[in-house]
């Protein structure tokens, strides 16, 4: 039973930590982020298993973690407020060519990220060519260009 409780606690802890870390951090992982993820995985393994290195303990832990993931997806489907709390929602970062600095700072996105998406997705080079830049739940930035007059 201790293994199951450890699994639930670690799952919820990691969910909160990665949610606080922001969307862009998960979407655009660098080599450093990958190394950090490996270190977190190793550290987590020690906390999950403790002294129990049995196959049965590992199987129970895998079932617990997958069960938690299924439970989270069911809760998100059933309760939209829960989905918004766990995954967040789309967020406008640029409105009619004007950067919304408080949102950029909160999500750790900068002007260069928006311009990069604008170039890649729409071939736009300047902020004034963009009507909206929206940070999606998955960390991508959607660009809606200004209407040409």
Image (cartoon, rainbow, N blue to C red):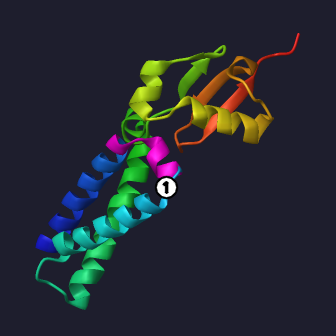
Residue at image location 25% in from the left, 90% down from the top:
55
Q: Which quadrant of the view contains residue 99?
A: top right
Neighbour class for label 1 at 10 Å: few (<14), some, many (≥20)? few
User: Image quadrant of residue 93?
Assistant: top right
For label 1, the residue is 29
Range drawn in magenta:
20-27
**Looking at this rendering, what residue extends furthest in the right direction?**
149
Taking the image as shown, residue 79 lies to the left or right of residue 149, namely left
Q: Is residue 141 left or right of residue 108?
A: right
Q: Nearer the viewer, residue 58 or 46?
A: 46
Report which quarter residue 14 is drawn in. Answer: bottom left
* Percent of width and height locating residue 92: 55, 23
Q: Farthest residue toward the bottom?
A: 55
Q: Is residue 36 above or below residue 142?
A: below
| Quadrant where the image shows the C terminus | top right
Q: Is residue 24 inside the magenta stretch? A: yes
User: On screen, 48 above or below 122?
Assistant: below
Q: How many marks?
A: 1
The answer to whether one can see residue 77 in this image is no
Q: Is residue 144 magenta?
A: no
In the image, residue 13 above or below residue 109: below
* Residue 137 locus on image (x, y percent): 52, 39
Q: Which residue is depicted at the point 27% across and 73% down?
A: 42
As rendered, which of 78 and 131 lies closer to the eye? Answer: 131
With 144 as the anchor, is 72 left or right in this view? left
User: Residue visible at 59% across and 21% down?
Assistant: 94
User: Magenta-highlighted stretch: main secondary structure?
Assistant: helix
Q: Is residue 141 left or right of 42 when viewed as pictured?
A: right
Secondary structure state at the residue bearing disc 1: loop
x, y (%) of residue 76?
Answer: 42, 44
Q: Residue at x 26, y 78 (%)?
A: 60
């Amino acid at each position: 039973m201790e293994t199951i409780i450890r699994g639930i606690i670690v799952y919820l802890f990691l969910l909160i930590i990665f949610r606080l870390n922001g969307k862009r951090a998960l979407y655009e992982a660098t080599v450093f982020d990958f190394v950090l993820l490996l270190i977190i995985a190793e550290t987590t393994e020690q906390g999950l298993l403790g002294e129990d290195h049995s196959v049965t303990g590992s199987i129970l832990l895998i079932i617990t973690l997958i069960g938690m993931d299924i439970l989270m997806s069911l809760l998100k489907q059933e309760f939209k407020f829960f989905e918004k709390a766990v995954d967040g929602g789309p967020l406008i970062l640029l409105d009619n060519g004007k950067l919304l600095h408080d949102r950029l700072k909160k999500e750790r996105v900068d002007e260069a990220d928006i311009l990069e998406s604008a170039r890649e997705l729409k071939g736009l080079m300047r902020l004034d060519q963009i009507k909206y830049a929206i940070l999606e739940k998955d960390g991508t930035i959607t660009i809606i260009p200004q209407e040409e007059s």
